[in-house]
Amino acid sequence: MIYTVTFNPALDYILRLETFTAGGINRVNYEQVLAGGKGINVSIVLANLGLKSTALGFIAGFTGEEIKRQLLNFDVDFDFVQLPEGFSRINVKAKADVETEINGQGPNISEAKREELFSQLDKLVEGDTLVLAGSIPNTLPDDMYEIIMARLEAKGIRIIVDATKNLLLNVLKYHPFLIKPNNHELGEMFGVTLKTDEEIITYAKKLQEKGARNVLISMAGDGAILITEDGVSYKCAAPKGKLVNSVGAGDSMVAGFITGFEESQGDYEKAFHMGVATGSASAFSENLATRPEVEALLKTIV
């Protein structure tokens, strides 16, 4: 079974405007409200590709109810911990000549509710896949990922981590199955600017030396690189298309990789290509990738 964890789910209020003027009145010409959060995005794309998963995390209030309603429409199973006070956050994403984001804070998460999530995770068994994605809200410990991975370390669970900087570096000692920094984040971890594929591969291997099994580096329009635990490196150019919406593209790549890995029974190259095609399909669409969109792009990947 596949599980995703989103500590701080959200409703993303997406706006499009011709121009944005701070301090003035702005007229919107397009708006949409979508359930969001990195783990939730992964679960939605998995469902679009035909794989079942269960979304875990914390929700609260009227926004939490709307998140659940939307996930039901996507045929995504969930088992959220319900918080008694506050409401799940609302993130405003305004897209004009420049993009502006205002992200909500989210509700308070008590220690008792945190233990409820731990109890759910304790039920995972060998062969399950767990996706830990996104930032940690300030009402949870900074080392939340480490706590979870230490708790599950001996259970034979494939854990995928999509996080940045120290949040990612600190969990490598628990040997995550897959990590997915982008090329800029990879450079930031080591205080360098990476300009060539060879440099990216060199530093990706340093993450393997620290404990990561497989390292997937996303590079936006330049495609992606995968370094497998077998020591094989794959490079794939990005499929051609018009960038419409980059939100969720990285999460879609993770979902595509999982789908390709499951469907090919562990073929890393097929998983990699499926990940690249799925991330691109989301980037070329107003919404998250669908199976037909992904399969069309897969045919263009060499």
Image (tube, rainbow, N blue to C red):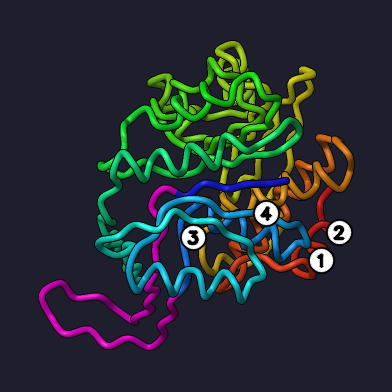
Image location (x, y in percent) of residue 82? 40, 58
Which residue is labeled 2 in the image?
Answer: 299
Judge by depth and name the residue closer to the eye, 192 or 53.
53
Count of all numbered marks drawn on residues in the image? 4
Taking the image as shown, residue 94 lies to the left or right of residue 256, namely: left
Q: CA distance from mark 4 to mark 2?
A: 26 Å
On the question of residue 292 being in view, the answer is: yes
Q: Residues within 10 Å of mark 4 (few under 14, many from 20)?
A: many
Element type at marker 2? loop
The residue mark sitting in front, 3 or 1, is: 3
Amino acid at the residue labelled 2? Lys
- Whether the residues at callouts 1 and 2 have beta carbons within 8 Å, the answer is yes
Residue of label 3: 247
Range of magenta residues = 7-33
Comparing marks 3 and 4, which lies closer to the viewer? 4
Residue position marked by numbered label 4 in the rendering: 53
**Amino acid marked by disc 3:** Val
Q: Nearer the viewer, mark 2 or mark 3?
A: 3
Residue drawn at x 39%, y 42% is 135
Location of residue 23 by image quarter: bottom left
Task: Tell me the crowding category of disc 1: few under 14, some 14 to 19, or many 20 or more residues within 10 angstroms, Cα based.
Answer: few
